[in-house]
Image (cartoon, grey):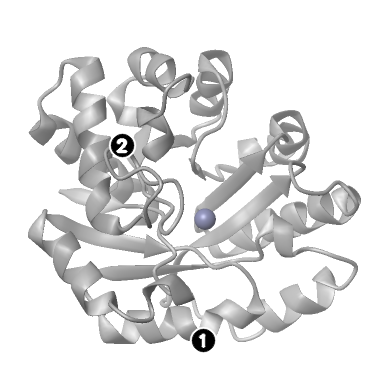
Amino acid sequence: MLIDTHSHIYLKEFDDDLDNVIQNAVNVGVEKIILPNINLSSIAKMKAVKLAYPLLTELAIGLHPTSIDDNYKKELDAMFCDFNPTQYVAVGEVGIDLYWDKTFIKQQKDAFNDQIEFAKIHNIPIIIHSRNSFDEILDVLKPHIKSGINGVFHCFPGNTEQAKCVVDMGFYIGIGGVLTYKNSNMPAVVKNIPLQYILLETDAPYLSPVPKRGKRNEPAYVKYVAEAIAYLTGDTYETVCATTGANAKQVFGL
Ligand SMILES: [Zn+2]
């Protein structure tokens, strides 16, 4: 059960060959691809991909932190006004990104908090994007933990200590192509965190794993992530796929 829990295959990078990309994924055994949203303008294409591949794909809805500015409340209202819980498996991707720009840090925190509240009301998990912002994420998230909110820190950017903190809060660690990069913290994280807390992802079209690094990423390449984990932990490839697949089913209710 190979599941790509984070893939933006609705972006223009896939306009010309999405059928092939989907076939490649199926050929290597990918059984589900979760598509997290970015902003209002990405919803229509995301839904179109779901319509074209209804059994293979699942959707998440949310406003990405790099899309947040002074208008975020209007955008959230428009995004969630016709929310239908049967259409979405999660709220995402949401969070705080202080790598590119700190101008809207207050708005990013508020929007993150509002979207956590929305996920709590609908009893669905959240897909968290965190970049140079682990402490800020914790500040916003921690008061909600006792409500039972859960989800995943996608493309987990932290160290082993931070990973343990994430797991203690009941969240999963999303592991993608960065695991295969030189100087990555992720091998240490993967060796120290039980497989029961790990989800596989690509973040396609970004962050291709070795041996595809530098090329466009696609869901089929999630197999390289599973192979890298198996190599590091000593588990079989099948165990890595089965355990992380079961984790994804559990958290997203697949
Ligand atoms: Zn993403």
Q: Residue at x 37, y 74 (%)?
A: 14
**Element under label 1?**
helix
Residue 8 visible in rendering: yes
Residue toward you, 228 or 199: 228
**Placement of 147 over or under 228, stated as above or below:** below
Q: Residue at x 82, y 49 (%)?
A: 101
The three-letter amino acid code for the residue at tag 1 is Ala
**Placement of 203 over or under 35, stated as above or below:** above
Q: Residue at x 54, y 52 (%)?
A: 126
Q: Earlier in the sequence, mark 1 or mark 2?
A: 1
Can you give x and y, in whole percent of width and height, for residue 91 in the image?
Answer: 55, 61
Q: Quadrant of residue 32?
A: bottom left
The three-letter amino acid code for the residue at tag 2 is Val
Q: Is 34 displayed left or right of 22 in the figure?
A: right
Please identify the quadrant where the C terminus is shown: bottom left
> Label 1: few (<14), some or many (≥20) within 10 Å?
few
Q: Which residue is mark 1?
A: 44
Q: Residue at x 34, y 40 (%)?
A: 209
Q: Which residue is mark 2?
A: 210
**Placement of 205 over or under 186, stated as above or below:** below
Q: Is 94 displayed left or right of 213 in the figure?
A: right
Count how many numbered circles sit on residues in the image: 2
Residue toward you, 18 or 83: 18
Q: Is 98 displayed left or right of 165 in the figure?
A: right
